[in-house]
Image: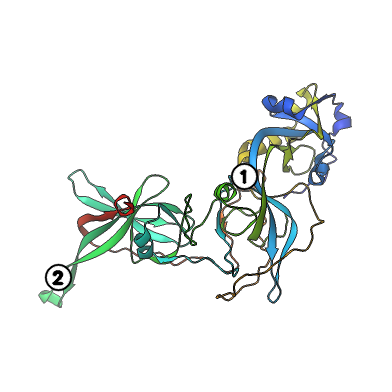
Amino acid sequence: MADVSADPSLPLDNKLNVEWIDTLLTNIKDELPKICKYEGNVPPGLKLYSQQPVLLYRWYNKRKGEVRTIYRDSTGPYYEVGQTLEIPDDFEGWFELVPPDFGRVKYFESIEEVSKTMPMKFFTRTNLSGICVNKSDDNEQTYVQRKIPAGTVLKVDSTFKAKWRTCAEIGVMKKKQKEWTTREIQYLKCIDNKEQEILIPLTAKGKFHPVYQKGSSDSKCVFRMKDILKDLTLPVKVRIIYGKPPVVPCIFTGMMVIKRCITEDVIVGSTITFKRHALFELPVSDDVKICTTKSEEQFIDMKSYKDAIQLCTKYSDSYSSLIKLSPKLDTDHQMIQHIPTEKTKQIHESLKTLDLITNISLTDDEPRAQFMESSSDDTVSEQSLTLGTLVELKELSNRTSMMC
C-alpha cells in the first residue's frame, strides 16, 4: 500500500525522549485522535508498526465478512488460494451469487425487460442515455438529455408514453416543403440518488440487474455486502461486479467464498515515523497493550504528525470500508477445492489475479470504484436521442399498481 521503509531523518522514540503511560485500548476511545504505541500479542500484519509512535485516529465498530479468493487456471479446477481477506458490510460494491455451474449470472438485456418485472431498483452495467422533462413558466414541456454512467442504481417508478413531432424538408430548391411526422416512444421512468426523474427508452439495450430486496428469489439480483452478511446463509460463493479494489498486494480474482461473519471494534490509525505514511486498522483486543504519551507537545509541530492527521482526516472513513488483507496474515490454509454442481452452459474464462491494487496517500486520488471483470463489462454506447418537439407525455402504469 505504501513505502514503509524507515526514515532516519525523522526523530524516533528514543530521540524524542517520549514518556509513555500504560493504558487500555478501551480507555482511549473518547480521547482520539491520540499518539500511542502498541505492543503485546499483536496480529502479525501489524507488528511492523508496533513499539513506535503512531497516530490512532478514529474508533469503528465493524461487521465484516472473512473471505478467501477462488482461483482457476485455463484447464484446472477451482481452488481457494491466498490469505484471508476482510470485507466490511459498508463496502460500497456490488456482488452476484456464483451459480452452481460457476458461470455468470443472467441479467436483463433491455430496459423493456426491466419494465416487465418492475423491480424496486436496478443496477446498470451499461452506459445509458435518458431524458429529464421539465415544465417551463408558460407550462410547456421541455426536455434535456441526461447521461447515466454504468455503475448507477436507479429506482423504478412507472412507464410512460411520449409523442414526439419532427419536421423534415422534402423536395428540391424552391419546391421544398415541410413534412411533419409524429411518433410514439415508450419509456421507463426512474429516479436517481439525487431524486431526479429520468425517462429511459424501453428500446435501450445493455446489462441490467435487479437490486436484491429482502425475500427476493430472483437469480439475476446483485447484492450489497451488508445484505449478504445479514440475510444469506454462510459460507456462500460470490463474484464482485463493481467496487473499489483491495488496497494491499494480495491474490484477488473477483470470485470468492465468504466463510463467516465477524463483528469487532477497530481503530484506524497512521504511521508517523516512515518515509511515506501508511494507514492501518488495529483490532481492539485485551491482548494488545497500549501506551499513550504523557505529553504530545513535541509532536505537534512535526511535519510527519501534521501529514498523518491530514491523511486520516481525508481517508479514515473510506479506508475503514475497503477490502483489506486480514492482519492475521494466515498462510497455513489447506488447499480447498470447489467443484461445480452443474455442467457449465457458458465458455469459462480463466480466473486470473487482477492487477487492481490501489494506493492511499496525500498525493493520490481516493481509490475509485470500477468494474472487476476479466473481460470488459461494459458498455454499450449511449443512444443519441434526437427527438423533436414533445407533444404529449402520458403515464401508462406505475410500479405500485403493478405490485397490487
| Mark 2 Cα-neighbour bin, 10 Å: few <14, some 14–19, many ≥20 | few
Label whose residue precedes the other's in the sequence (2 or 1) = 2
Residue drawn 88% across the image and 30% down it: 15
Classify 178 as above or below 132: below
Horizontal arrangement in the rendering, residue 31 relative to residue 174 (left or right): right
Residue 179, disc = 2
Residue 212, disc = none
| Mark 1 Cα-neighbour bin, 10 Å: few <14, some 14–19, many ≥20 | some
Horizontal arrangement in the rendering, residue 388 relative to residue 102 (left or right): left
Amino acid under disc 2:
Glu
Residue drawn 22% across the image and 64% down it: 184
Query: Do the numbered discs 2 and 1 sit on residues whose CB atoms are within 8 Å?
Result: no
Q: Position of residue 2 (x, y in %)?
A: 74, 49
Residue labelled with disc 1 = 321
Horizontal arrangement in the rendering, residue 22 relative to residue 322 (left or right): right
Q: Residue furthest right?
A: 14
Residue 321, quarter of picture? top right
Label 2 residue SS:
strand
Q: Position of residue 35 (x, y in %)?
A: 75, 29
Residue drawn 63% across the image and 53% down it: 234
